[in-house]
Every structure is written in C-alpha cells, then in structure tokens.
Image (spheres, rainbow, N blue to C red):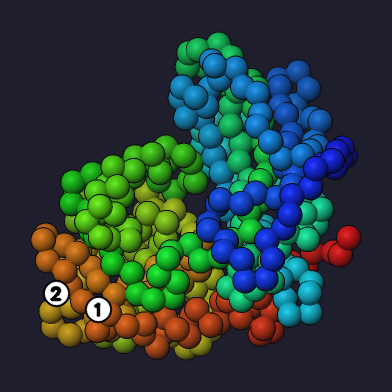
C-alpha cells in the first residue's frame, strides 16, 4: 500500500510522566484516512494532521448507522520499544463486521498494514507510565450522499489514536454490575457478534440508568428468553463456579472478544478448566447464594481484566468474593498485562513489535 504522509505543522505537547490520561479524551497529532468509491476502489491512503473531516449531510452513516470499528492497543516496554497485542485478530474481526453491514469490503491484511504503519509513525505518543497504553481505533463508515437504502458505493476507512490510562475509574478494584432486565442489546441473526455502532447505541439507555444508580456497567441477557447471560457493555464475562471457569458461549449475539479468546487460551495453558456454555442469571445468583460462585470478572481491550464485586439482579445486590479481586482474576490480569507490556515472555506469539522510527 502506498501511503502519502503530511506531517502536522503544529504538533501538540505530549502528556508527560504521571499525566492524567482519561480514556478517549486526548488525540495524537495525526490520523490515517483512505477513501473508497465504486470506480477506483480503495485509494489515496494518507496520514494527515488530526482534525475535523467534511461530510455530506446525506451520508449513509448519519442516517442508517453504516459504520464498523475496532479497538486495540500499543504498549511501551521497559526497554522503550513498543508492541501491539494480537492486531491480526482485530483486523479479521473488522473485515467480518464491514461485510456484515455490506460496507465496501476491506481485507484484514490491508487493515493490519494500515494499523502497523500508522502506529509506527505515531509511536512517540505511546505513554510509558505503568498501566498506560496507546488506544487504536480503526473504523469504516459509508458516506454515500443520496438518502435511501441502497448498496454503499462511497466509504472512508480511518484510524485515530489516544494515549490512555485505566478505562474504569476503579482500575483493578472490583466493579458493580447491574443485570439488565428490560432492554435488549442484540439478537442472534443481527449484528451482536460484530463490532458496529448500532449495538452500542442500543445499549445507551440501560447504561445511562445503571450509571445513575451507581453501577459501572450493564450485564446483558439474551434477546429471546432474557434469561441467559451474554456480555457486559464493554467486556465479555467469566465466572468461577465450584472450581470451573464458565463463560457464555458465542451464540451469534455475543461479541467474540479478543481478550476473551486470549483469557481462555492463557487459563487453559495454566491448567484451569474453562467451559463455554449457556449460563443463566438464575444459575449465577444461585451460585452466590450457595457459596459456589468464587469469582467473576470481565475481559476486554479497554479494561483488559476487571473483577466484578457486586451483581445487581431483581432489586438485590449480590456480593461476590467479599467484593475483592480473586486469585484467578489476579493471575489472569498479571499474565495478560505481563505479555502486553513485555514484562513476561510471550510464549503464545501474540505480540507484534513496532519498528523504531
């Protein structure tokens, strides 16, 4: 891919050591853009100064939500070099998501090349404080101008990046999660297993209500029976019940999380039994009541691993593991973050080094 580069003439001051890095608030100096139209296909790949983009008011994304995105991170190691964590998995999921929305196809290899090239260019923005990283947001959206439902013939693929700290203000402290009993996030046959904006828009009302009532996130139930646990708004979820680690299976309405996949592979390598199956809210509550629910946690790119200390269901708060981080959750967090930040050897082959400029 030939990429044109236009460097900013007004570089920003990068956050210093110990700076507050609220998630998604600070953007780097540049952004990656590539255009698509029916005649030329994907063309004019470029890295340009970060800033607003022009968009026709009739653009498809504004009216019909034709947009897909990804989220991954770059990490700075103790020796000063940087690396990505399983970027090919994000690229493959991006390809699947855009195809599901009938956006112009972009293959995983192109997405991966764009990510690696852009992060290499912006690597000075990767922070070095413990627990910090550079969040990478690739996205594609339709920008056809005629209003109406039709095949999308114009689109943009972009990447923006943000230096970030912890996603949740609690950090690694246990979070409070409310099981949603009314709204539905997704249903099998829809787009629940893709990373598209509509899934998150459908989540906003329940997330807002939960936050107003003191909860960190919502835990979604399936859209048919509203019985089986699926995922938290920004994480997949895992439970340790009677020594067995259980995570909801991928039924077509659950996002196949890359951190989820990594957690399963890591825990299995450590000898833990991990089962992917349907698990109901009632089963989890019963396990709390009879003392067999030992731990619960979420997994995702933004938070990596987040222990769940309280589950709220049908008007009752159920405390898990005395609202403390459990042994398996801590082992998983240390294991994954150790690989991501290069503190421990990557025996899985998950990391991709970024070349120094």
| Element marked by disc 2 | helix
Q: Residues within 10 Å of mark 1 (few under 14, many from 20)?
A: many
Which residue corresponds to the image point at 67% horizontal and 57% vertical from the top-left? 88
Q: Quadrant of residue 171?
A: bottom left
Query: Disc 2 marks which residue?
Result: 286
Does dot 1 land on a helix, a strand or a loop? loop
Q: Is residue 294 left or right of residue 201?
A: left
Per the image, the residue denoted by label 1 is 320
Residue 74 in sight from this viewpoint: no
Q: Which mark is residue 214?
A: none
Q: Nearer the viewer, residue 132 or 312?
A: 132
Residue 69 placement, left or right of 189: right
Q: Which callout, 1 or 2, points to the residue nearer the camera?
A: 1
Q: Is residue 184 above or below residue 76?
A: above
Q: What x and y, as percent, mark residue 157?
A: 67, 36
* Crowding at mark 2 (Cα within 10 Å: few <14, some 14-19, many 20+): few
Please tell me which residue is depicted at 60% across the width and 17% down the height of the picture: 56
Which percent across, then down, holds residue 141? 58, 32
Residue 97 lies, with reference to residue 153, above or below; the image says: below
Kindly indicate the quadrant of the structure image that contains residue 220: bottom left
Residue at the spot 67% in from the left edge and 44% down from the top edge: 159
Q: How far is the residue under mark 1 from the one under mark 2?
A: 12 Å
């Amino acid at each position: 891919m030939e990429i044109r580069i236009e460097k900013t003439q007004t570089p920003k001051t990068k956050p210093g050591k110990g700076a507050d890095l609220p998630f998604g608030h600070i953007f780097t100096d540049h952004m990656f853009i590539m255009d698509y139209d029916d005649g030329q296909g994907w063309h004019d790949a470029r890295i340009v100064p970060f800033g607003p983009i022009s968009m026709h008011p009739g653009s498809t994304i504004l009216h019909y939500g034709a947009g897909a995105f990804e989220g991954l991170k770059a990490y700075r190691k103790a020796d000063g070099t940087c690396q990505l964590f399983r970027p090919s998995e994000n690229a493959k999921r991006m390809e699947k998501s855009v195809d599901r929305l009938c956006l112009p196809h972009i293959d995983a290899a192109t997405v991966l090349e764009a990510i690696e090239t852009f992060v290499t260019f912006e690597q000075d923005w990767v922070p070095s404080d413990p627990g910090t990283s550079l969040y990478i947001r690739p996205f594609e959206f339709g920008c056809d101008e005629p209003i109406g439902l039709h095949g999308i013939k114009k689109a943009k693929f972009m990447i923006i990046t943000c230096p970030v700290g912890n996603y949740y203000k609690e950090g690694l402290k246990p979070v409070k999660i409310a099981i949603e009993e009314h709204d539905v996030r997704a249903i099998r046959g829809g787009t629940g297993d893709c990373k598209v904006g509509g899934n998150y828009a459908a989540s906003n009302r329940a997330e807002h209500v939960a936050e107003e009532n003191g909860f960190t996130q919502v835990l979604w139930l399936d859209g048919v029976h509203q019985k089986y646990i699926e995922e938290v708004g920004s994480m997949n979820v895992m439970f340790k019940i009677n020594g067995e680690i259980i995570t909801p299976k991928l039924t077509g309405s659950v996002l196949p999380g890359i951190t989820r996949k990594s957690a399963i592979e890591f825990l299995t390598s450590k000898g833990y039994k991990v089962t992917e199956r349907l698990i109901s809210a009632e089963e989890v509550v019963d396990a709390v009541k009879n003392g067999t629910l030992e731990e619960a946690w979420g997994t995702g790119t933004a938070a990596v691993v987040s222990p769940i200390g309280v589950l709220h269901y049908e008007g009752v708060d159920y405390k898990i593991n005395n609202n403390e981080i459990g042994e398996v959750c801590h082992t998983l967090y240390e294991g994954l973050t150790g690989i991501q930040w290069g503190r421990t050897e990557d025996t899985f082959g998950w990391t991709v080094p970024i070349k120094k400029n």
